[in-house]
């Protein structure tokens, strides 16, 4: 059985998908663009964009009753791998102790011209 997870504090889906789905104690968070739900604007600069994407993930996890400490896997999509180190500085501040497993890729383009998009899997 699956459950749709929705947070009003994170941007709504921009297509036919859910912010997150919970199944069998696992929460699959869709890729989060760096959009601020209050302003509707995208953050500027890779560090601010990484921070906003991670904040959006944090809000969705909170809606599921979880924290960033429940994250076991992340995938980071970057429009330019030259931004990896700056993204990484921000990313490291969102996890205590053991970091989740992670993949990071440079992609040709991200929705809405974003520089970063981050998705994750969390486990209860």
Image: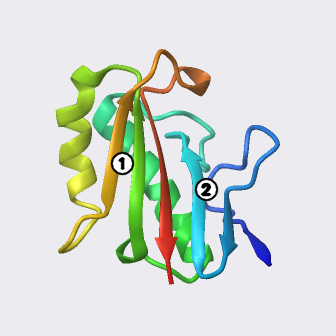
Task: Kindly identify the residue that appears in the image at 61 percent across and 61 percent down.
Answer: 9
Please state if 4 lies on the left or on the right of 60 as rendered: right
Residue underneath mark 2: 10
Q: Earlier in the sequence, mark 1 or mark 2?
A: 2
Horizontal and vertical percent position of residue 83: 25, 27
Horizontal and vertical percent position of residue 12: 72, 49
Please state if 50 lies on the left or on the right of 93 as rendered: right
Check the image and report above or below for 99 versus 47. Answer: below
- Residue 103, by quadrant, is top left
Q: Secondary structure at mark 2?
A: loop
Q: CB under 8 Å between callouts 1 and 2?
A: no
Which residue is more in the foreground, 104 or 95? 104
Rate crowding at label 1 as few (under 14), some (14 to 19) or many (20 or more) other CA atoms within 10 Å: many
Task: Kindly identify the residue that appears in the image at 65 percent across and 49 percent down.
Answer: 11
Residue underneath mark 1: 51
Give the Cα separation between the discs numbered 1 and 2. Answer: 13 Å
Which residue is more in the foreground, 54 or 124? 124
- Residue 110, by quadrant, is top right
Task: Kindly identify the residue that appears in the image at 50 percent across and 63 percent down.
Answer: 121
Q: Which mark is residue 20?
A: none
Task: Kindly identify the residue that appears in the image at 33 percent across and 51 percent down.
Answer: 102
Check the image and report above or below for 30 versus 115. Answer: below
- Residue 48, by quadrant, is top left
Horizontal and vertical percent position of residue 106: 37, 24
Please state if 3 lies on the left or on the right of 43 as rendered: right
Horizontal and vertical percent position of residue 91: 27, 51
Check the image and report above or below for 6 versus 123. Answer: above
Position of the N terminus, as image quadrant, is bottom right
Rate crowding at label 2 as few (under 14), some (14 to 19) or many (20 or more) other CA atoms within 10 Å: many
């Amino acid at each position: 059985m699956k459950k749709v997870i929705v947070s009003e504090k994170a941007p709504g889906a921009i297509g036919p998908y859910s912010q997150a789905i919970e199944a069998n104690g696992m929460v699959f968070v869709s890729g989060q663009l760096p959009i601020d739900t209050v302003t509707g604007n995208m953050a500027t600069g890779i560090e601010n964009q990484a921070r906003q994407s991670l904040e959006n993930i944090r809000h969705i996890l909170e809606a599921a009753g979880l924290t960033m400490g429940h994250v076991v896997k992340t995938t980071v999509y970057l429009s330019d791998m030259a931004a990896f180190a700056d993204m990484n500085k921000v990313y490291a501040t969102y996890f205590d102790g053991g970091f989740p497993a992670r993949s990071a890729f440079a992609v040709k383009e991200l929705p809405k011209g974003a520089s970063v998009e981050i998705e994750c899997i969390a486990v209860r």
